[in-house]
Amino acid sequence: MIKLLAPHMDVNAKNFNKKTALEIFQGHSSCNQDIVKILRAFFYIEDKSVREVILVVSTLMVTATYQAALSPPEGYWQDSSSNALTNSTEIAHGKPHQAGKMILSGRQLYRFTLLNSTTFLISMCIILAAIVPLFPDTYMVGLSMFLLATTYFFSLTTGFQNSDDGAANLIEGFFMVAMYVFFILSYWIWQKRALVQQEINATRRRIGDF
């Protein structure tokens, strides 16, 4: 059919915007399709069983790291103290403390925060990458993950001692921004994917009209 129609087609015909069919295609389809190809090369996995394993493991890692943020190593102080010195029968940490704050402090706190938040961030990003192609059906899942990430960072930072607030909050601030940037990027990717799908569907309808 295309071979029969081709000799009778005017390839130089222009629309109301003074653009030929080739110019319209290059201006609207190429860029978005290139984005989709790049994303598929990095994120798409053909084997369904592999995708399911990755998703299950990522979910378990999010659960474990979230629980670690709620129950950090050494736990929380049960009382408040303004004394720099403690008795020999008490646990000596050398600094005043406040009830409800983490016992863990200094470099150990920074290492824990860095490693736990890195694992949480990577796992959340993997899950987001899996649900983005299914938008808008998975919209509520994405919203729940956004709220979970907010709760995670808020719970972790509120447990820091005042003396550790500076560096620890800086670490958490970095991961929080990175997490929210990935959420925004995921939404942008979904919009691009939806736009490409609309163009494909529109092309199919135009071909079907012949």
Image (spheres, grey):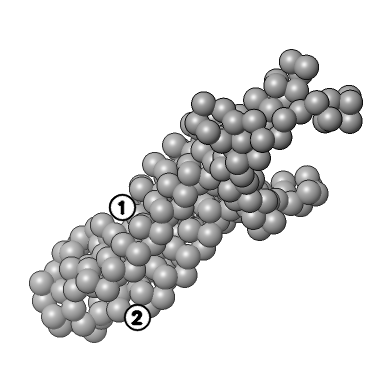
In which quadrant is the C terminus drawn? top right
Residue beneath the point at 51% across and 26% down? 16
Residue 193 in sight in this render? no
Q: Position of residue 34 (x, y in %)?
A: 63, 51
| Residue 179 quadrant | bottom left
The part of the image, by quadrant, that contains residue 87 is: bottom left
Q: Check the image and report above or below for 78 versus 91.
A: above
Q: Secondary structure at mark 1?
A: helix
For the N terminus, give its image quadrant: top right
Position of 105 with respect to 58 (left or right) is left
C-alpha span from label 1 to label 2: 20 Å
Tell me the element at label 2: helix
Extreme-top residue of the structure: 209
Q: Residue at x 72, y 46 (%)?
A: 52
Q: Is residue 45 above or below residue 194?
A: below
The three-letter amino acid code for the residue at tag 2 is Arg
**Residue where numbered disc 2 is placed:** 107
According to the image, label 1 marks what residue? 154
Q: Dot 1: few (<14), some (14–19), or many (≥20) neighbours within 10 Å?
A: some
